[in-house]
Image: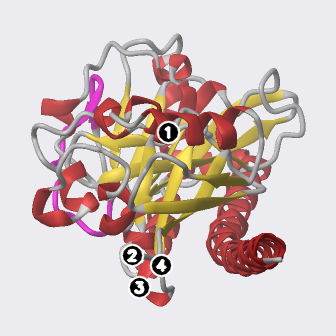
Amino acid sequence: MNKVRSLFSLFFILIACSDSVQEGYQSDKLVLSQMVSVLEEQAAILTREIVRIADKMDSLLQNKEAILSQDLPDPYRMDGAFSSIPTLGDTARSTVILLNSTTDYQAGLEEIKLTNSMDSVFANLYSKYVNIAQVYFNTSNQVSRVYPSYDVVNIIDPNIDVTEFNFFYEADEEHNSEKGPIWIQEPYVDPAGKGWILSLIHPVYDGDRLFAVIGIDVTVDEIIQNFFDNYEGSFLIVNRKGDIVAGTSSAIESLSMPPLKNHVYRETIKADYFRITDYNLFNSKSREVRKMASHFLVEGQDFFPFVSESYLQNAVCQRFDDIDWFMIKINPRIK
């Protein structure tokens, strides 16, 4: 009789635990879905902004003859690839380059004149959003306009071909047949110390010819630095490769990763010794964490129970819709 009672007790305990796990999973999925929606709405706002910029450039192209016929001041006075007038620190002007790889220098000068009014458009947009690192466009004829201005002479090789970079060719007709705004799927760590950068780009056509590609570079950590504080728990954002784009220190430090600088990931990213491969789920020292990464990022599952990790209970995952990222909640084991 005692054995029967023990079996019944164990059965009901298992049922109760199962119900508790299911309730926790559903609650976590709801929170993760809300978090993803908030971030994607911020992305949607910038998408609408870049569409407006593209419309402005379309208008310039439609009025090209009238604009070029005007006797307008020349704020750059190009001398070879660079402006002969310093622009660094000038909040009213961009940095403009006419690269040596151009096939038509005179046409490039006309493109600069045609688009000089974009400086104020870029400046207004940049001032509206703290998470924007820079606004720019590059033309098929190798004209580059970037706001805010930077030390271009010491940073840019004037012999490069901008059409060979993903922030240009990802918007061409081969890669973007719909000719609308797209987010480049792979973020990168900015060498100038701004942390993770994500690029939103939009092509501009002159008839059937790709005239230029507009870009907005976003500093991801500006978006999320206070974001996680609004939610209770340990969270990560990772890309398809398993790189940790952002996360709470409690989540990252629980997954057998290298130590964080001052226990803060965004500070770690900006450190001279930072290597993104060190903070990749597939490179965790824990076999079970690597298994979790495969479970979510390769197999497309959204729940993972930890077995051998003594301090971790389970993890729940929610995929983003508009970019190939994943939001993960790490749940500690309750003693």
Residue 42 placement: quadrant: bottom right
- Please identify the quarter of the rendering in which residue 229 is found: bottom left
Q: Where is residue 203 in the image (x, y as percent from the top left)?
A: 71, 41
Marks 3/4: CA–CA distance: 9 Å
Q: Position of residue 120 (x, y in %)?
A: 46, 69
The residue wearing badge 4 is 233
N-terminal label among 1 and 4: 4
Q: Nearer the viewer, residue 143 or 80?
A: 143
Q: Which one is earlier in the sequence, the residue at label 3 or at label 1?
A: 3
- Please provide the residue range marked out in magenta: 78-94
Mark 2, Cα crowd under 10 Å, few <14 / some 14-19 / many 20+, is few
Q: Which disc is residue 229 wearing? A: 3
- Does residue 162 show up? yes
Camera-nearest label, 2 or 3: 3
The amino acid type of the residue labelled 3 equals Asp
Q: Distance between the residues labelled 1 and 4?
A: 20 Å
Whether the residues at callouts 3 and 4 have beta carbons within 8 Å, the answer is no
What residue is pinned by disc 1?
Answer: 288
Q: Which of 111 and 50 is in front in this view?
A: 50
Query: Could you tell me which quadrant the C terminus lies in?
Result: bottom left
Determine contact: label 1, label 2, CB under 8 Å.
Answer: no
Q: Give the vertical position of 265 relative to 308 (above or below).
A: below
The residue at 55%/52% (across/down) is: 306
Looking at the image, which residue is at 27% across and 60% down?
266
Q: Which amino acid does label 2 sit on?
A: Val
**How far apart in space, not on screen, are marks 2 and 3 (Cα)?**
18 Å
Q: Where is residue 295 in the image (x, y as percent from the top left)?
A: 67, 39
* Callout 3: SS: helix
Residue carrying label 2: 130
Image-based side of 78 in relation to 180, left or right:
left
Is 320 in the magenta? Answer: no
